[in-house]
DNA sequence: CATTGGCGCTCCACGACAGCGAGTGCTGGC
DNA sequence: GCCAGCACTCGCTGTCGTGGAGCGCCAATG
């Protein structure tokens, strides 16, 4: 008889404590928790029989469920939700752990930073780590042409954030090195920081005196640059998927597991989920199917946005089984986001 | 009674034909094949009983084995080996398929080319595709400094192959933009194409007239460049690991599967295997544990080296279950290597 | 009125067991 | 050399019975 009331029903202190210890025991053991075990671990001095009454109530309210008639109870998604929202006590990381974590981030360039962050998350939690690469602004800081062959140019593009993109361009005309330098100079001196959109619009109007073939070259560059930037606009880096293979909660259902890994491969829907997180401040938790993605049925996603110069540009997170040690994972994700923010900001 | 003779024993024509159809049936069905099935599909007009005699011989010679007393027979690693070496008839790909394949390669830059090649391989074979990224020469074609902050420089490095590397450098002194241009010019004009090793050696001797802090800057650049190049020297890109989750041959053994995916994550040992392949010409096949890696027990690896300007620089390949359709996979790997070679050569 | 011990019930897990089907090895006849 | 037939082996499947864990309910208790 589960009415799925929208408002969370009142839970007296005892029920809350019992729910809390039940969830904790289940997270620790992975076994359905019975009344006897609860009576032993709750700290309350109650007999199993009394506990059973409370458990029946909790079941009615949809916080816990029994896999079958005569097993213990396990938390439902809703039970986990209540647990993390009001029952959970996270313990912050040690200074030492933070330092370790910081030491593992590779700051050589943005890509390395992002992928090492993802890796660190997966190592520390033993689940899958995900990082959404920083959104890039549409503009550029520096542009450069390099001649590879007669009609092949290498376009190098430094974004405002200090990332480097590159692309090969086929040209119709053969340009001299000095022409290439000139074109690059024009773009760098007049338009650095502008969006490619703008530049294209202004190019015709403002540069009447520049030779036709030069504007052609620049237009080609802009198109390629535009494409390069928009294409690599946002992506999600996943590490440690392997860890999930070891989790029995997940690997018992081979079909589900495959769905899950498929989700990882077709990044787009995962990206949407993580984008949601980047609209909020602080750590967010998606439990089970809350995210709307069926493959994540038995998973939870813990995310936190990270920022550059106070502006949110991406999300880090961990994907693991619903039955995870939230009190550990949450601070890890939180700190990683903060470290990533500060590493990105000082550049 | 398996003596594991080193020399391949003589097999009369009938035995060969039967082994061939047995392997083919097993590859198609995945079920141990019995004498009855063989008598039906071999084309020979023999009764199951006679077939059984031949099968017993084949088993003695170690080409096939029975999983248990009363199942059919399954090819052993040795059986597969004989099969691919002398029994297999590969049918080349259609012109159409080749064109499709070519169309899916993304030629924008080397990284994309490599990862798309890996992806194509996995898509076409429905197994995991692997590509070892091209070996880079130690030298550079073009170098450039860009100021990010007072004491932070972005080093952009174009390798001889036209790849772009980048790296952030912390400096002690604050350099002016023109100093940066000057330093880059010196390196580009005098040392393009040389290895960083050489340059460092020659820098002191040849450039006495250049100011001390400039050589310092260049030295820092060289060190960073050296590191960037050597670090990203060789890596293996894997796609479509998910496909392997769907293969029942592999996903029945959860533990094995996990080992396999662990192998994928710690690239190094896989890299060694693939390097072996790049010392030979043409398609190579590693069956089961032949490669010396236990996680690959039930896998085969089909590889082919690819080249730039006639020089082998890397390897493409497919990792799948031993029970794979070799006659299809082999040409796919072959063609992909050739397409990759030609795409890389024209730049 | 909350708490508790007790009782009957339900369901899963596990092991034993039998029947079936597939396939083999062997033997004796052609 | 080939082949039909037979006995045998073994894994797979479904059934049955038992034991255990846990629950719901109820009546007794402080």
Image (cartoon, coloured by chain):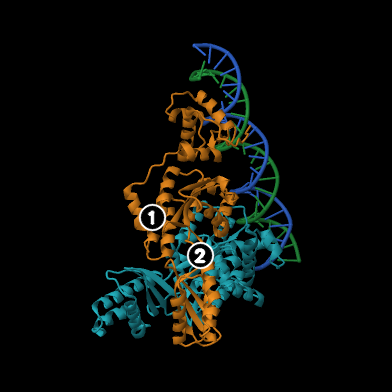
Chain colours: A cyan, B orange, C blue, D green
* Disc number for residue B211: none
Q: x, y (%) of residue D18?
A: 69, 41
Pick whichever, A74 or A314, lies toward us: A314
Q: x, y (%) of residue B163?
A: 43, 68
- Does dot 2 land on a helix, a strand or a loop? strand
Pick whichever, B245 or A323, lies toward us: B245
Q: x, y (%) of residue C25?
A: 60, 25
Left or right of residue B165: residue A248 = right
Asked if one can make out residue A316 in the rendered structure from this viewpoint, the answer is: no
Compared to residue A233, the image places residue A259 above or below, namely above
Instruction: For marks 2 and 1, give the CA distance.
Output: 29 Å
Tell me the subunit letter for badge 1.
B
Both marks 2 and 1 on one chain: no
- Does dot 1 land on a helix, a strand or a loop? helix
Pick whichever, B158 or B50, lies toward us: B158
- Determine the residue positioned at 38% across, 42% down: B91
* Disc number for residue A238: 2
* Disc number for residue B339: 1
């Amino acid at each position: 008889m589960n009415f799925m009331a929208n408002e969370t029903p009142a839970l007296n202190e005892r029920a809350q404590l019992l729910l809390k210890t039940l969830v904790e025991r289940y997270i620790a053991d992975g076994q359905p928790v019975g009344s006897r075990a609860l009576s032993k671990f709750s700290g309350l001095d109650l007999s199993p029989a009394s506990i059973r009454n409370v458990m029946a109530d909790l079941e009615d309210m949809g916080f816990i469920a029994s896999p079958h008639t005569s097993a213990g109870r396990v938390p439902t998604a809703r039970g986990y939700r209540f647990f993390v929202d009001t029952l959970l006590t996270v313990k912050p990381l040690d200074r030492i752990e933070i330092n370790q974590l910081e030491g593992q981030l590779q700051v050589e360039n943005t890509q390395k930073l992002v992928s090492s962050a993802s890796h660190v998350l997966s190592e520390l939690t033993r689940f899958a780590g995900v990082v959404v690469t920083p959104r890039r602004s549409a503009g550029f800081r520096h542009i450069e042409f390099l001649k590879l062959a007669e009609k092949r140019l290498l376009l190098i593009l430094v974004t405002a954030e200090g990332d480097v993109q590159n692309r090969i361009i086929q040209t119709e005309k053969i340009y001299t090195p000095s022409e290439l330098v000139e074109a690059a100079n024009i773009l760098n001196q007049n338009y650095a920081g502008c969006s490619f959109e703008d530049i294209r619009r202004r190019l015709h109007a403002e540069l009447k005196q520049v030779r036709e073939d030069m504007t052609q070259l620049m237009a080609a560059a802009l198109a390629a640059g535009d494409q390069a930037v928009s294409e690599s606009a946002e992506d999600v880096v996943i590490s440690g998927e392997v860890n999930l293979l070891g989790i029995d909660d997940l690997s018992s259902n081979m079909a589900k597991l495959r769905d899950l890994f498929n989700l990882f491969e077709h990044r787009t829907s995962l990206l949407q989920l993580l984008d949601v997180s980047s609209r909020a401040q602080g750590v967010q938790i998606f439990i089970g199917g809350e995210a709307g993605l069926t493959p994540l049925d038995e998973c939870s996603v813990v995310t936190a946005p990270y920022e550059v110069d106070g502006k949110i540009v991406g999300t880090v997170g961990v994907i693991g089984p619903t039955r995870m040690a939230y009190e550990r994972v949450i601070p890890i994700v939180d700190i990683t986001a903060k470290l990533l923010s500060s590493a990105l900001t000082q550049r």
